[in-house]
Amino acid sequence: MVSTTLSPLPIAASRIRLEIRNLQIRLVQWRRSLHQRPELGFREHLTANFIAQKLTEWGIEHQTGIAKTGVVAIVRGRRPGPVLGIRADMDALPIQEENEVEYRSQHDGQMHACGHDGHVAIALGTAYYLSQHPDSFVGTVKFIFQPAEEGPGGAKPMIEAGVLQDPAVDAMIGLHLWNNLPLGMVGVRAGALMAAVELFDCVIHGVGGHGAMPHQTVDPIVVGAQIVNALQTIVSRNLDPIQSGVVTVGRFHAGTARNVIADTAELSGTVRYFNPDLVNFFHRRLEAIVAGICQSHGATYQLDYRKLYPPVVNDGAIAHLVRSVAEEIVETPIGVVPECQTMGGEDMSFFLQEVPGCYFFLGSANPDRGLAYPHHHPRFDFDETALGFGVEMFVRCVEKFCV
């Protein structure tokens, strides 16, 4: 990712249309209402009801209960034409909020710590505006309010439920409020924006015994320590240095006492990469390393390796459209980061495997107001000025695509 300060950049108010500026108060109200009632993946019943109530109030055609809690809405333009999908994820995280604000979470142990409440508010604002201005575009906009992005993943079940059909979606866009960028900055690029997410759990089976008599044992901690070190060579010595990849062991658990050599050790971690051609590379190398080290020590192993999300890969033409819109709104040339990337993952990737599209980052940090904590932090919050900015971005994308 391009290095940048987190000082907010100016957003040209004159470039955000008056109707959307007037909508800002309602966007904030919707976002804060959602923030107070966060729900985990596939349990977003209150959130889905809130969305459905607004859509019903505005007379917008919609369906509920898709992939358990998903909602899909349709807004039609002045005549038939292309179909653009806009995706907003709805779920929260199992985090206890530490913010002392009037709209803090009322659900213990659950928090909107990644901005999905803002994503829903922006999509609702866009749906409302377009429903009030159908003559401003041609074709159809399909709003996909998706459950369970944080896990176990709601995009694939929604696709399997047919949300990209009837009418068939020609392209998709989506945004992520991003506290790694300051308010007023947009991160958008063609190609890989976010990484594939793969997970592994490994149990090493040794032979336990007395800590003073290691020759009678097969020490799984020693085996596991060698595995942890060797896994780092996958990126440093097996991966083409032009490529990017991460292998992280985040958990290593073994033993119960100082003088006891354990029977087993457990390792868990994650793998990240951008290039879709590497889909089986890390799994093969990781298992070969684990198998080889275990065999050399007389240990055995069980490996559970799971591919969670593929990389988020943006279509060049749709990314160009989004970038052109951002350049119309952002006041300064440095407001658009064309090579923004992160090793974080997102199941928007499944939509982009089916249809061309673009996922982009909308800067939302404002350290001058104490709004710069990272995503998934118990004090995460963002500058709500980004809400109107997001609606203007989406509306202009619709107007440029649906012509």
Image: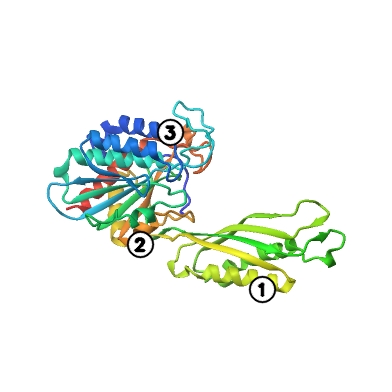
| Residue at (19% x, 55% y) in the render | 82
Mark 2–mark 3 CB contact (< 8 Å): no
Counting from the top left corner in percent of width and height, residue 280 is at 49, 70
Residue ID for mark 3: 37
Q: Tell me if residue 210 comes above or below residue 176 in the rendering.
A: below
Q: Amino acid at mark 3?
A: Arg
Q: Quadrant of residue 103?
A: top left
* Horizontal relation, residue 193 to residue 59: left or right: right
- Which badge, 1 or 2, is on the more N-terminal residue? 1
At horizontal 44% and vertical 70% (from top left) the residue drawn is 277
> Is residue 137 left or right of 349 when viewed as pictured?
left
Q: Which mark is residue 292?
A: 1
**Disc 2 from disc 3: Cα separation:** 32 Å
Looking at the image, tell me whether mark 2 or mark 3 is earlier in sequence order.
Answer: 3
Q: Earlier in the sequence, mark 1 or mark 3?
A: 3
- Coloration mode: rainbow
**Which percent across, then down, holds residue 223?**
72, 65
Q: Disc 2 designates what residue?
A: 353
Q: Is residue 161 left or right of residue 7?
A: left
Give me the C-alpha separation between circle 1 and circle 3: 49 Å
10 Å crowding of disc 2: few (<14), some (14-19), many (20+) = some
> Which picture quadrant has residue 255?
bottom right
Q: Secondary structure at mark 2?
A: helix
